[in-house]
Amino acid sequence: MSEARILVIEDETPIRRFLKIAIESAGFTMIEADRGRIGIERAATEAPDLVLLDLGLPDMDGKSVIGAIREWSQVPILVLSVRDAETEKIAALDAGADDYVTKPFATGELLARLRALLRSRKAPAAERPLLSFGALAIDLAAHTVTVDGTEAKLTRKEFEVLALLARHAGRLVTHKQLLTTVWGPAHLEDSHYLRIAVGHIRDKIGDDAADPKFIVTEPGVGYRLLG
């Protein structure tokens, strides 16, 4: 992971300078682009391991950049934007972003999310039958969940929700993605199904929404399993 190449698509020079210091001090290499179209070109030619993208670019909206990259690449995309409205976050994630951080941001949290996305790309959880997150272990083949070696009895839907979060550990999974995958496209408006399921999962694995060890809530947007 120390040799990972991070493409930063950001038009503000001071922010790029700050990010360069943070990213390179963490052992990564930074590639720069100050326009959306330049960023798309460098994503294609420089083969970055992750894209860090601002939405407010001067030549095109960042969501269009996401869409263009997603036409041919599944490189992790982390949005870094001053736009903090739920609708903006949901639109960016639905366009294909993997995570979303609002400005101003804590450098430590940003780097932690970068590392989580890089880990998920290096060893995709979906390809491993047994996933471990500290005391939490999820066996995708046997459909079992244990915490400190003790089995947690989840229903089928609860297991599917947790398994989907585990397959995207460290990434933000939207309500839409969870509802569509677990309950089907006809249940996009049934967010209470998801809220109840996540509440039951937390109870059964000993997690606390106010001080989460495993599942983090992104209010109005989705959930993220700490990787």
Image (cartoon, rainbow, N blue to C red):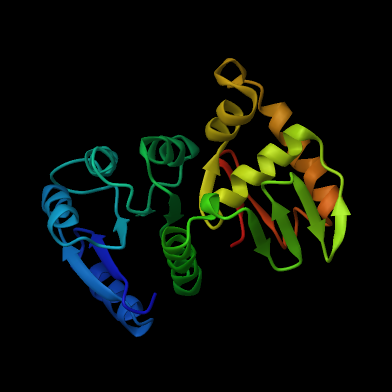
Q: Is residue 187 left or right of residue 19?
A: right
Q: Image height check: is 155 above or below 225? A: above
Does residue 80 appear left or right of residue 156 in this picture?
left
Residue 38 image position (x, y, % from top left): 11, 53
Q: Position of residue 187 (x, y in %)?
A: 62, 19
**Taking 125 as reference, is 196 left or right?**
right
* Residue plotted at (81% across, 36% down): 155
- Vertical arrangement, residue 53 with respect to residue 93, above or below: below
Q: Quadrant of residue 93?
A: top left
Q: Residue at x 45, y 51 (%)?
A: 99
As drawn, 48 above or below 196: below
On the question of residue 218 being in view, the answer is no
- Residue appearing at x 35%, y 82% in the figure: 27
Question: Closer to the camera, 140 or 93?
Answer: 140
Asked if one can make out residue 98 in the rendered structure from this viewpoint, the answer is: yes
Outermost residue to the top: 186
Please tell me how many numbered marks the rendered image carries: 0
> Which quadrant of the rendered structure holds the N terminus?
bottom left
Q: Quadrant of the C terminus?
A: bottom right
Residue 177 at x, y = what percent?
53, 34
Q: Quadrant of residue 199?
A: top right
Residue 94, image x and y in percent?
A: 42, 35
Which sits in the foreground, 104 or 66?
66
Closer to us: 69 or 196: 69
